Image (cartoon, grey):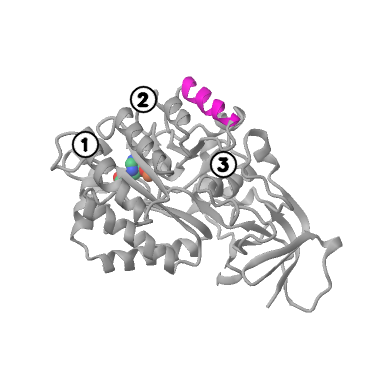
Amino acid sequence: METLFKHIKGLVGAYEKAPKFLAGDEMRSFSVIENAWLSFKNGRINGFGNMDTCPNVDVNVVDCSGKFVLPSWCDSHTHLVYANDRANEFLDRLRGLTYAEIAAKGGGILNSASSLREMAEDDLYDRSLKRLHSVISLGVGAIEIKSGYGLSKDGEEKMLRVINRLKEASPIPIKSTFLGCHAVPKAFDSASDYTDHVVEDMLPDFVEKGLVDFVDAFCEVGYFSVADTCKLIEAASALGIKSKVHVNQFNTLGSIELFVNKNALSVDHLEVITEDDIDALKSSMKNSTPTFPVALPICSHFLGIPYTQSRRLIDEGLPIVIATDHNPGTAPSGDMLEAVKLGSLKMGMEPIESIAAGTINGAAAMELQDEVGTISYGKRANFIVTKSISGLEVLPYRLNDVVVDKVYVNGEIWVG
Ligand code: NIG
Ligand code: FE
């Protein structure tokens, strides 16, 4: 059955021929067609335009007067597969311990790794599927999910298998990232020894089994060095796999230029950044696919660390991406709308820029731009329909109002 939305107050991100991503000033002009129509059939978009061109056809017509329609969120950075919450560590933090101090006493990633080890794979899958369904209800229409709480070959493979099962069961596209270098397990003397194990004993096998779309490393003081991270990126690249890197979360390590030169698809976090890092990101704009800077504002909010300077990065001409970082330690939320609102509330972005960062640019940072991220012919009919609102600025402005009316997935109402 074909569905036709009529009288949409603003159809966001609609393109006859969509750009792959938007950078700098372009982000402010993410397309909005006023008084629009949109049609879709068999789960795919098959037409849109201004009401002047609306077809007069006998289909399922939905009146969208006063409402905006947006492409669903594209969350390009999550750790959605995990065993248990770490709410107890949150209490430790309130009592004065830092992220590093909590990790040093066996909390943090090592804590998640031990609960994951004990949990049966089916349980892990069930919990993760529930989380996936709940973020789809919040309007997520495509998602990346990382391993990284396994910290052993068996553990990492278990996570990647769970991600693969989620892919099969999921109504939305999922990309799987092998976060091989996340923390150093106790059995290893050094990060570099563990990196060798990851690169030699895990990566080729997991790639051969078709479990890996991207690789990732936590490049940070006390975790993995720039050299370790480069070793993983290079090994992955030799196998045709692109990388995404956790970097500049707490310390700048002067590594962005190297990662850009090694064609990383994205560098994520960037709560701290240097002028050289910004220059390196700008230099990547000459490549057909740049290295995307990914801001994770829920992590900044939750940990009370600086926000990524997204306003500055846009003003420098860069294609900023916003994602959730959904994980039990530093961002216990998969709410992309919240992340997008923080774009305006804390990172100085105009609502339309923030929406572009969480849709079209998020899709490109997962290489899913042909499927999702804009309203375009043939793309998935994954949208968010708002309630009747005066403008997109209402999203961040009405801090806690419920602004989402309906979520569509593959042309069907998922909630609403
Ligand atoms: O993106 N920083 C590294 N990894 C995650 C946190 C993982 C955790 O604490 O469980 C992040 O913030
Ligand atoms: Fe992360």
User: Magenta segment range?
Assistant: 275-286
Considering depth in this image, is 286 or 26 the residue closer to the camera? 286
Decide whether residue 49 is among the magenta residues.
no
Q: Earlier in the sequence, mark 3 or mark 2?
A: 2
Mark 2–mark 1 Cα distance, whole angstroms, equals 20 Å
Mark 3 or mark 1: whose residue is earlier in sequence: 1
Dot 1 amino acid type:
Glu
Q: Residue at x 28, y 55 (%)?
A: 157
The nearer-to-camera label among 3 and 2 is 2
Q: Residue furthest right?
A: 52
Q: Which residue is mark 2?
A: 253
What label does residue 101 carry, if any?
1
Residue 365 x, y percent position in the rendering: 51, 45
- Judged by depth in the image, the label closer to the viewer, 2 or 1, is 2
Q: Quadrant of the C terminus?
A: bottom right
Q: Is residue 8 left or right of residue 76?
A: right
| Disc ID at residue 344 | 3
Inspect this view and state whether residue 329 appears. no
Q: Alpha-carbon distance for marks 3 and 1?
A: 31 Å
User: Is the residue 273 above or below the residue 138 in the image?
Assistant: above
Between the C-alphas of marks 3 and 2, the distance is 28 Å
Q: The disc labelled 3 sits on which kind of residue?
A: Ser
